[in-house]
Amino acid sequence: MSIIFNLIVIAMVAFIAYMWSQEGLLSSFIHFLCTVIAGAVALAVWEPLAYIMMGVREDIAWSVSLALPFLVTLAALRVLMDVVIKYNMKFSNVANMIGGGVFGVGSGIIAVGILVISMGFLRLPAGFLGYKPIAYDGQGNLVRSGGLWLPADKLTAELYERLSVTGFASATPLALMSPNINEQAALMRITFDDRARNTMSPDDFVAIGRYTVSAANPNELFENQQVRDLDGKPFPSGTTIEGFVMRFESGAKEGGGQIVFGSGQVSLIYEDADGRTHRAQPIALVTQAKSDRVSYGRFRFDADEAFLASVGAASNATMAFEFPVPPRATPTFVLVKNIRVPVDRYPPLPIEDAQGGTLTTAQRDAAIDAEQILVGSVALADGSSSGGSSGGPVPINRGGTVISGVDADELRNSGVKVSTKLKFGFRKGNRGGIEIDSDNKIIRGEKLFSELSADIPTKLRVDEFYTDSGTTLVQIDVSWESRISILGKTLDAALRIAPVQLRAPGYPPFEVVGYIFKDNNGTKIRYDRGNPVRAFSQLPQVSQSKPDDKLTLLFLVDKNKNVEISTLQVGTKPIVTFDPPMPTIRRF
């Protein structure tokens, strides 16, 4: 965290405290009361004023609508108090200094807290001035990562939450409607490339419906996605997944024409059994998968900086956000880029096979595939049908993809290549930790390349892996866009520590001896025939939420006319079946 920002906050509070310690105990106490009232007024008018301001300047609406009422109210109250209370009270110098300083600290914390919260709602980078109270945990979860040394924003939020259900109680208390508004500001700033929109208009989306998914235990419910709450704690048994379907209109689009969401910009507010309110972030998004055909998929927020966007050029897009909700908790509101909608605006979807309104994970997946969650729910909202197909959900084929035919075009289109050649190469002088032989072939090692090129002189180019005369490599693209993707497969804990293998009848399994992984950081090449990848979990972090990431696995196989690859497996679970089996003697 930035030392400078912490020092600025401490200095501002200290300055306000010092100033009022010089004014005396009574003046400092009166100013403290004015500050408390000004903060309450600002938070009371904040949301309706922001809705009005969004028609003027969306990017500053939430910030100005909080800071401006606070400053105006505080100034007005100060003028009023100076007119009404014309005389001071006499206290000792020590009482004036200490008492004035104490109330000055309180006024400073509230004033600086309101300032920090209001600044947080500006369209600024997530880590502006180094302050990032919410951050990714390495597994795609957003968790609390530490506050300010003097947590003025947190203390201010907690003060007004307590007052909203006690001394300043109302029918719409802050504690129940927008808990932890200091964190809400931080979550809204976690946007794609720190440049995407952090708010939208209430007219930019419509609540469509909701559904519930349950399972015997969290591993089954989350399908081994490592889900954590904002405190970094796992969810207990009895947790359910609550899905909320929304249709986003053209006004929700970014400048590039897409609707983009990260896991920080949509939240579910829920009450626990003790009446305390909490915030949950989405763990997955259901939306259209490809622009070239009507197909729908469930994309998990299981990677840091995962942002999901609408596809195609349609004027609107329907999406379903899924949230974890612990047992005995009651969802109350859904916040979409600061716009709060009551849960009761989302009617239950009439999904077939739901038992008591609850789906299993398989039924949820089948409902997505059968277009009951998105297409069916939109039809329901339009009043044209009850949603879903008359034949019921189409079951998902959990047995794996079948690749038919073994001709060169079919294999190439499926992301399979039997070859030792790289598509691109690198200069031998830039090989880093990669060992090469006299023919510029890769023997072993790994390195992250910022750039690869095909335009390198032959004598300087490294673009092939070494194998002996009796073996070759099968290269398989397992990225999300590939027909042989291994992403999103349901793997239990045992399979996640099992190896990824190619199987051929009559032969031992062929293991992963390397990979080519491309993401925003560059291209990483790993190749080590003597040290194969022993577990699925040891492969690079790949996610459905980052479709541009590419992962190609390298399998060392026997080059023999009798070797015919029949399946790609994780442990004993078939992921892809080649029908008929794929020979390795040919080079495509």
Image (cartoon, rainbow, N blue to C red):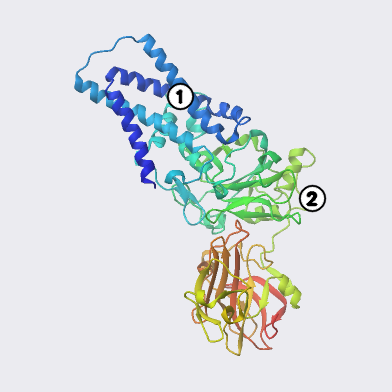
Tell me the number on the disc at residue 259: none
111 lies left or right of 340? left
Q: Are marks 2 and 1 in contact (CB under 8 Å)?
A: no
360 w.r.t. 498: above or below: above
C-alpha gap between disc 2 and disc 1:
60 Å
Q: Position of residue 399 (x, y in %)?
A: 67, 67
Q: Tell me if residue 404 can be seen.
A: no
Front residue of 568/424: it is 424
**420 and 585: which one is in front?**
420
Q: Looking at the image, which residue is at 63% across and 30% down?
A: 55
State which mark lies toward you, 2 or 1.
1
**Mark 1: which amino acid?**
Leu
Q: Quadrant of residue 330?
A: top right
Picture quadrant where residue 424 is located: bottom right
- The image shows residue 34, relative to residue 486, as above or below, that is above
In the rendered image, which residue does mark 1 sit on?
71
Q: Quadrant of the C terminus?
A: bottom right
- Tell me if 55 is positioned left or right of 47 in this view: right
Q: Name the amino acid type tagged 2.
A: Ser
- List the residue tagged with mark 2: 390
10 Å neighbourhood of mark 2: few (<14), some, or many (≥20)? few
- Looking at this rendering, what residue extends furthest in the bottom direction? 469
**Residue at the (62%, 37%) spot, across then down:** 200
- In the rendered image, residue 442, in percent from the top left (x then y), is placed at 54, 80
